[in-house]
């Protein structure tokens, strides 16, 4: 298993763009490793709807496996994209704070002909949620998952982004964006309207805003026997309410069948207590609940965006069509929460 | 009199072909897509077979809203009333209607979704 490996595994890409990319990476090879002579075994890995992830091997006296993240060509309406150079900078800042990360080796320039993106080391581990929840060798990693995530999030929220330009998101702006996106891309859903009203009537206090990962959940957390060994996919990072990250990890769709709230693996209290103990700041329990309801609804609205991609002709895949039918699972989670049902 | 095999039988045969014959004989990426396609076909099959639930949903909406109409139109009306605050979870029948409707949707869209299965088990 490797960085950003999705359910489909490796996929052969169109021959000509792949050869162009391989040529560009081969020219870049000496800058990726001392004495490197070229690249081999370039394959596109699936997973990641708005970014392409490629694996390749650096050849020469010290061969090593690397990962390229780059922007695909198709426009995806409704999705705000962070420049990949910013994502690379965030990974470096997080690594400096002790967050488990791959090492960023090179940020691409346009004249290098490999597109917009960056090259990083390949970390070995599991990213697929259902496998993380079942793999026997990950049992001890699962037991400490919730507190480990609390400590990692405390470290992420302590990052000072300096002069890196990042969007600011508050509870108000998050709610407004969901209302607007649901109206633009979605369909009539009385359950979503109930959740939107609940959110409007129960706005949390605004704590000091911090750097947030923005997509901290199973699927973006690589695990091995030692626990989380890489935090991936920084494209959603922003300045915001730290409760947003704490709650997003608990959204029902990221539990993959597990009954515990934190990634299906642990109780919320373990996450919160470890976060507070690691200096992350006091966790406002009401804000955490608000952001979890908001997180569930946000995933529902993102699913509605995907319907927008299909309508716009940007994604004709069967997989996208099937995922776009998953808004009903969010209706179930929201309705259960709002009516006090444990499911 | 419906012709045999019916639509749901044809779709069942297509899903079985995709899963059991096409998927094992395709490269990894296409094999994955074939299994996803089988799931999509099975979803359509379940939706066709769920006609009675859709009619019950429409009847509940007519009772809630006190007027006749088609399913999309009535659902839009209910969404607007919730949005405007004219109806909420204290409205008699609303919570039950939404729960039944949502459970029926999951039965079509994702019958294997773990929270849905737990909710079904709790109802049984």
Image (spheres, coloured by chain):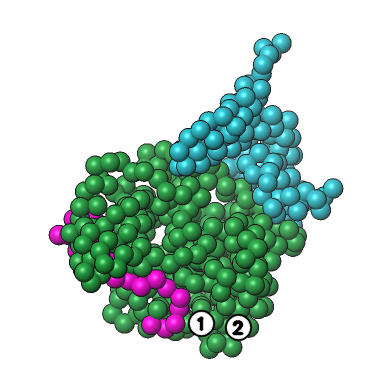
Residue B106: name its quadrant.
top right
Mark earlier in primary sequence (1, 2): 1
Q: Nearer the viewer, residue B43 or A205?
A: B43
Q: Nearer the viewer, residue B60 or B116?
A: B116
Q: CA distance from mark 1 to mark 2?
A: 9 Å
- Tell me if residue A101 is in the magenta stretch: yes
Output the chain of dot 2.
A
Q: Position of residue A325 (x, y in %)?
A: 55, 43
Output the chain of dot 1.
A
User: In the shown orientation, is residue A200 left or right of residue B115?
Assistant: left
Q: Which residues are magenta?
A: A96-119
Q: Residues within 10 Å of mark 2 (few under 14, many from 20)?
A: many
Q: Is residue A170 visible?
A: no
Q: Position of residue A234 (x, y in %)?
A: 40, 67
In the rendered image of the structure, the colour used to display chain B is: cyan
Image: B43 above or below A300: above
| Colour green belongs to chain | A
Residue at 49% over, 72% down: A229
Determine which residue is flagged by label 2: A274
User: In the shown orientation, is residue A109 left or right of residue A145?
Assistant: left
Q: Is residue B26 visible?
A: yes
Do tag 1 and tag 2 residues touch (Cβ < 8 Å)? yes
Q: Position of residue B56 (x, y in %)?
A: 74, 35
Q: Residues within 10 Å of mark 1 (few under 14, many from 20)?
A: many
Residue at 57% over, 49% down: A327
Residue at 65% over, 63% down: A136
Which residue in the rendered view is the most extreme toward the front? A61
Image: A14 above or below A258: above
Residue A154 - label: 1
- Which secondary structure lies at badge 1? helix
């Amino acid at each position: 298993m490797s960085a950003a490996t999705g359910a489909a595994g490796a996929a052969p890409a169109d021959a000509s763009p792949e050869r162009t990319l391989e040529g560009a990476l081969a020219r870049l090879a000496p800058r990726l490793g001392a004495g490197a002579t070229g690249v081999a075994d370039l394959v596109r890995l699936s997973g990641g709807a708005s970014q392409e992830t490629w694996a390749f091997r650096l050849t020469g006296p010290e061969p090593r496996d690397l990962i390229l993240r780059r922007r695909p060509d198709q426009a995806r309406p409704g999705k705000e994209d962070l420049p990949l150079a910013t994502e690379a900078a965030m990974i470096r800042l997080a690594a400096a704070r002790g967050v488990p990360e791959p090492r960023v080796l090179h940020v691409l320039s346009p004249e290098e002909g490999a597109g917009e993106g960056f090259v990083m080391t390949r970390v070995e581990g599991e990213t697929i949620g259902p496998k993380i929840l079942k793999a026997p060798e990950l049992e001890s990693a699962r037991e400490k998952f919730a507190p480990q995530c609390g400590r990692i999030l405390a470290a992420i929220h302590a990052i000072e982004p300096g002069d890196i330009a990042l969007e600011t998101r508050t509870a108000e702006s998050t709610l407004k964006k969901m209302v607007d996106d649901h109206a633009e891309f979605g369909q009539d859903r009385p359950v979503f309207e109930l959740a939107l009203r609940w959110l409007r009537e129960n706005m949390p206090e605004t704590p000091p805003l911090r750097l947030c990962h923005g997509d901290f959940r199973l699927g973006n957390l690589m695990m091995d026997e030692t626990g989380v060994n890489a935090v991936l996919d920084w494209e959603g990072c922003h300045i915001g309410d730290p409760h947003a990250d704490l709650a997003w990890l608990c959204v029902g769709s990221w539990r993959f069948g597990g009954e515990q709230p934190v990634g299906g693996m642990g109780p919320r209290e373990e996450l919160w207590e470890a976060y507070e103990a690691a200096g992350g700041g006091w966790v406002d329990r009401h804000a955490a609940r608000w952001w979890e309801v908001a997180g569930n609804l946000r995933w529902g609205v993102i699913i509605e965006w995907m319907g927008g991609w299909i309508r716009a002709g940007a994604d004709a895949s069967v997989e996208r069509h099937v995922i776009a039918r998953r808004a009903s699972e969010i209706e179930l989670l929201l309705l259960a929460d709002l009516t006090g049902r444990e499911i | 009199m419906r012709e045999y095999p019916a639509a749901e039988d044809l779709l069942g045969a297509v899903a079985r072909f995709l899963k059991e014959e096409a998927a094992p004989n395709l490269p990894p990426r296409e094999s994955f897509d074939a299994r996803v396609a089988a799931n999509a076909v099975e979803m359509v099959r379940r939706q066709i077979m769920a006609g009675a639930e859709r009619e019950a949903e429409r009847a509940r909406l007519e009772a809630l809203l006190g007027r006749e109409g088609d399913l999309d139109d009535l659902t839009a009306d209910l969404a607007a009333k919730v949005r405007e605050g004219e109806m909420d979870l204290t409205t008699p029948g609303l919570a039950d209607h939404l729960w039944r409707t949502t459970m029926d949707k999951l039965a079509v869209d994702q019958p294997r979704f773990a929270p849905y299965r737990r909710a079904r088990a709790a109802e049984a």
